[in-house]
Image: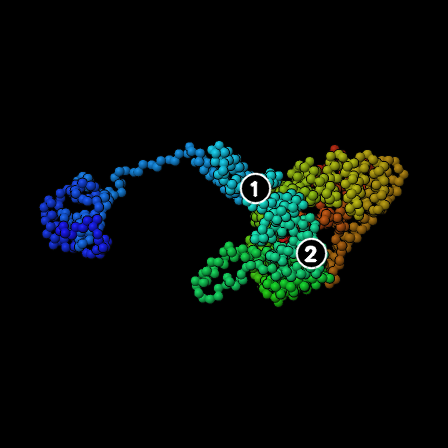
Amino acid sequence: MMENVHLAGEEDDDLYSGYNDYNPTFDTEELDNDVGFQQALRTSHGRRPPMTAKFPGTAVGARVLGTAFNSRVPMISSMGRPMTGSVQDGVPRPMTAVRAAGYSSAMSRGSTFDPLGQSKGPAPPLESKTEDTPEEKIKILEKKVNDLIEESCIANVRGDLQLALEKAKDAGRKERTLVRQRDQTGTADHINLDLTYSVLFNLANQYGNNDMFPEALNTYQVIVKNKMFTNAGRLKVNMANIYFKQKNYPKAIKFYRMALDQISNTHKDMRIKIMQNIGVVFIRMGQYSDAISSFEHIMTESPNIRTGFNLILCYYAIGDRERMKKAFQKLIYVPLGIEDEEKYTPSNDDPHTNLVIEAIKNDQLHQMERERKALAEKYIMTAAKLIAPAVEASFAAGFDWCVEMVKSSQYVELANDLEISKAITYLRQKEFNQAVETLKMFEKKDTRVKSAAATNLSFLYFLEKDYDQADRYADLAMMADRYNPAALINKGNTLFVRGDHEKAGEFFKEALRNDSSCTEALYNLGLTYKRLGRLEEALDCFLKLHAILRNNAQVMYQLASLYEVLDDPNQAIQWLMQLISVTPTDARVLAKLGELYDGEGDKSQAFQYYYESFRYFPSNIDVIEWLGAYYIDTQFCEKAIQYFERATLIQPTQVKWQLMVASCYRRSGNYQKALETYKDIHRKFPENIECLRFLVRLCTDMGLKEVQDYATKLKKVEKMKEIKEQRVKSARDNSARGRREGSASSVDSPISTPPRKTSEVDRKTVGSSSPRSTPPKKANDSGHSSRGPSARGERLSAKLRSLPDSNEPYEASSQCDIDASYLDPLGPQLERPKTAAKKRIEEDEFADEELGDDLLPE
C-alpha cells in the first residue's frame, strides 16, 4: 500500500493527472457487497467516536499538512476514506481543508448540524456610525440642503410660490452654515460649488416667480460675477426676462445680447431662442425694422411657426404688402416635424400591428403632434385674416389670394375655413347678401364645411325673422352633421319663436347631450321651461349655467326673475345685488331692485335704487312716475315738479303730466304759477275738462274776471262729450243689433269706454297709444323683461287714479254749480293715498327675452 504514497516534494511530470479516474470507494451501489462496511454496521465499530486528530480538520493524528494531490489509496479508515497524502495510481491526493465545513473533530457526541450558526441566536445589532466627526456633520448638512432645494421645486410645481420661496431661503441659510463649518474644520478647499450654485439659482428663480424682481436680479448678479461658476453667463437671459417683465426694454435688449455673446455657435437652438426674444422686445419698443432683421435671420437659419407669424405682424405694421405675401408663403411652408396621420390608420389585417396602432393613437407623442398642428393652423388662420384686407385692393380679393396659397400647401383643409371667415367678414361689414352668397357655395362641399355654412345661414335668416328659411337651413345643417350642437340650437330657436316650446326643448336637450358644455343650449332650455311654467326645472338650468358662467349678467337676471315669480323676493333681491356688482350702471336692474324693495315696504331703499336708476337713465317713465309720487307722499311737492316736467318732455301728448305739474305748484302755494300752467295746458288741450275745472276753481278763489269764460267753455265741452258718448253708444247698439239679425255687412264701430261721464284724463290714459321712450337695451340687458307702451298706460300710479271724475268733486246735485268747494286732485293733504306697489311681473312680460344666438364660429 505504501508504495503508492507520493510525497509533495517528489518530482512528477503531471501533478494534476488522474482526476477523471474512477475510485471504487465512492461507489455506493456496491455497499451491500462490502464486507467491511456490513461488519461495521453489525458491530459497535461504526458507532465509535471519530478519531481525534493532532491537527483540526483531519481524522488521522499524524497527518502531514503538505500532502500530495489526488491520491488514490486503498481504504484506511473504517469509513473507507483515503489517507491524506497517499498516492493512488501514482498520483498524490490533493490537500484537504485545514478545518472541515460545518463540523469539528472536537464536537461532542450527539451535537446537531448547524452550518449557519443559527443556534447562537440573532446577530448583535450593527454599531451606529458616530456623527461626532466633522466630516459626518458636513455630509448630513449637505443632504439637508439638497432636500430643501427639492422641496422648494416641488412646492413651485404645485403652485405654492410662497412656500417655495421659504424653502429656498432656508436652503440658502443652511448652505452658508455649511461653508462656515468647512472653514472651521480647515476643509475650505473642498467646498461643493455645485451645491452653492444650485442654492443661489433656485433662490433667484423663486424670487422671480414671486415678482420680487430686485432680489432676483441681485441673486443672479452674485452668480454671474463669481468666476468659479462655469457657464454662469447664460443666466443673463433670465435677467433679461426680468427686465422685460419690468418693461425696461433697453436693458432687456442689452442683457439678451450679452448672453448671446457668451453662447457658442454649437448651441444653435439657444441662440435662435434668444434672437427671437430680442425681436419680440423690438416689437414692444415699436422698432419694427430691427425686429424684422432678427426674425428674417431666424427664418433663414431655423424657421418656425411663431417667428414666421411675428414677421408677418412686423410687415403689416410697416405696411409692406409684397413682403407680407412672401412672409405668408414662408409661413405655410414651415416644416412642423410631425408624421402623417396615415401612420395611425390600420392598413392591414395583422392584429398585432393594429394593437400597436391603437396603443400609440392617443399617446403623449401623438397628442403633442396634434397640439403643434393646431397651433400652426391657428397662426395661419389669424395671419390670413389679418393680411387679407391689406394685400389686395379689397378684402375679398385678399381672401381669395390667401385661399389659393393655402390650397397649394399642406394645410388644404384650411381653405374652406378661410371661405367661411370671408363670409363672416361680409357680415361685420353689413354686406349680408354677399355673406349669404358666400355661404351658399358650401352646400355641395364636404359634410363638415356644409354643416358650418348651413348653421351660419340659418342664424342669418333667424336674425332677419325669415323663420322658414332659418328652419330650412337648420334642417340642412342637421342632415350634414346631426351632432352639430349649433344646428340643433338653431332648429330649437325656430320652434321656440313659433310657440312649439315642447319640441324646442327636445332639440335643446339633444344639443346638450352632444356637447354638455354648450351654454347657449342650456340657457335656451331654461327659457323654454320658464315659458312652459316649469319654474323649478328652469331654475335648475340657470343655476347650472351660473356655475359655468359665474359673472354672466343675463343668467343672474333670469335667476332673480324666477325667484320673484316663485314669491321669494329676498332671493330675487340677493341675485339682483350680485348683478349690479357686475353691471353697476344698468338702470333697468336698479329700477327692478327699487320695485322689489317697494313691494317689501322699504321705501328708503326703494328710493335709493330708483334714484340711481334715474341718474343713469333719466328717461324711464316708470321711474319718473315713482319718484314724483314719492316726493308728493313725503310732502315735498317742489321736488316732484322737476320729475313731472321731465315726463312732460318725454311724453308731450300726455296731459296728465302737465296737470301733475300744475297741481304741485298749487299744493306748494305758488297759485300764480299754477294758474299760468293751467292756462298753458288749456291752450294745448282746449277740450280737456279737468283743466277747465281747475281754471274755474283757481279763478274763483283768486277773484279773477275770466271765471265766467272758463265756466262757459266747461259747459260746452261737457255737453259735446255727452253727445259724443251717446253717438258712440248708439253706434255700438246698432252694430250689436246688426250682428244679431245676421246682416251680411258688419258695422265697424270704434272701441269705446262705457257711456258714463268719464274725465278727460281717464279717457286719454286708458286709450293712450302714443309711443313712450324706453331705455336702449344693453348687451347685458338682453334677457330682461320689457313692458310695452299700452301696458304702461294702463298701469297708472295711485296718485293719478285719485283724480276726480267730472261729476264728483264739484257738485252734489247740480253738474255746473261753480260755487262748490274746490277739491285737490291729489286728495286731502293729510289723507293722501300712498303709492301702490307695482304689479308682480306676469309670465307674458318675458316675451322679448333673447335666445342664445351666438352661433357664428370665430
Q: Residue furthest right?
A: 705
Please tell me which residue lies in front, 259 or 469.
259
- The answer to the question of whether label 2 and label 1 lie on touching residues, with beta carbons closer than 8 A, is no
| Residue drawn at point x = 44 percent, y = 34 percent | 134
Q: Is residue 163 visible?
A: no
Residue that badge 1 annotates: 227
Going by the image, does 855 lie left or right of 24? right
In the rendered image, residue 406, in percent from the top left (x then y), is placed at 63, 63
| Residue drawn at point x = 78 percent, y = 47 percent | 651
Which of the 4 quarters of the picture holds residue 101?
top left
Give the SS element for disc 2.
helix
| Residue drawn at point x = 63 percent, y = 57 percent | 299
Quadrant of the image containing the C terminus: bottom right
Q: Which mark is residue 315?
A: 2
In the rendered image, residue 151, in percent from the top left (x then y), is placed at 50, 41
Report the amino acid beneath label 2.
Answer: Tyr
Report the amino acid beneath label 1.
Answer: Lys
Q: Which mark is residue 323?
A: none
